[in-house]
Structure formats: structure tokens, C-alpha cells
Amino acid sequence: MVNLTTNAIQAMPDGGRLTIKATQKNGAINITVADTGVGIPDEVKPMIFQPLMTTKSKGQGFGLAVVKRLVEAQGGTIAFESKVGEGTKFHVTFPKQAE
């Protein structure tokens, strides 16, 4: 979550809105991290979770690749939607664990 929120803040250099929402539905925990930032260009979207992929001048390109691996290691999924100039929304879903 730290990486997703940091990326969201960095995507809004002139300010904006960061929204984090968690819900439970059908035995799953859903977390959404949304920003009103610059958005992700279409040509970058297919590579967004690849290691060493970055659009930042000082980025290393490991953040989202690590996030994806950690989410999937817990049995979860991660997806996103984004429009240039409107922002990005990441959806993370974890299966609910038995008590």
C-alpha cells in the first residue's frame, strides 16, 4: 500500500485527490487506491508491472513489480485503470481467510 500511495502522490505534482477505499464482498477484501493525477499513457500500460519499468527520472522500476508479486503471493490479484489527464485507480483483491 505504501508503494501505491507514494506513486499516486507523485502522479499529482500540482495537487489532487488521493482516495483509499477498503470493502468486503463475497468473501474477499477489496482495496482501491485512486488518484486524480496525470494518468498512465496507453503505451506504458502493458508493461506497468514489469521489473525495471519506470517513467520516473530517478525511479528504479521495481515498485509495482514487487507489489504485484507480494499481492499474488498472498493469493490476491491487482489490476488498474487509468486515463491520461484524469488519474489512475489500482484495485487490489485478497481472498478472505478463514478464522
Image: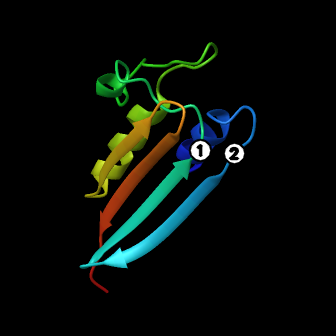
Type of amino acid at the residue the image marks with label 2: Gly
Q: Answer with the quarter of the image where residue 52 lies.
A: top left
From this view, report whether residue 46 is shown above or below residue 73: above
Q: Quadrant of the C terminus?
A: bottom left
From this view, report whether residue 12 is shown above or below residue 44: below
User: Residue 37, how many percent across, how many down?
Assistant: 60, 37
Q: What is the CA distance from the residue labelled 2 to the residue labelled 1?
A: 6 Å
Looking at the rendered structure, the secondary structure element under dot 2 is: loop
**Answer yes or no: do the residues labelled 2 and 1 have beta carbons within 8 Å?**
yes
User: Residue 87, how many percent across, how many down?
Assistant: 52, 40
Which color scheme did the rendering employ for the protein? rainbow
Q: In the orientation shown, which residue stands out farthest toward the right?
A: 14
The answer to whether residue 17 is left or right of residue 91 is right
Residue 16 circle label: 2
Residue at the image point whose x is 47% and y is 69% from the top: 22
Name the residue tied to disc 1. Answer: 36
The answer to whether residue 65 is left or right of residue 59 is left
Residue at the image point whose x is 30% and y is 78% from the top: 25
User: Residue 97, how many percent across, how many down?
Assistant: 29, 76
Front one among 27 and 39: 39
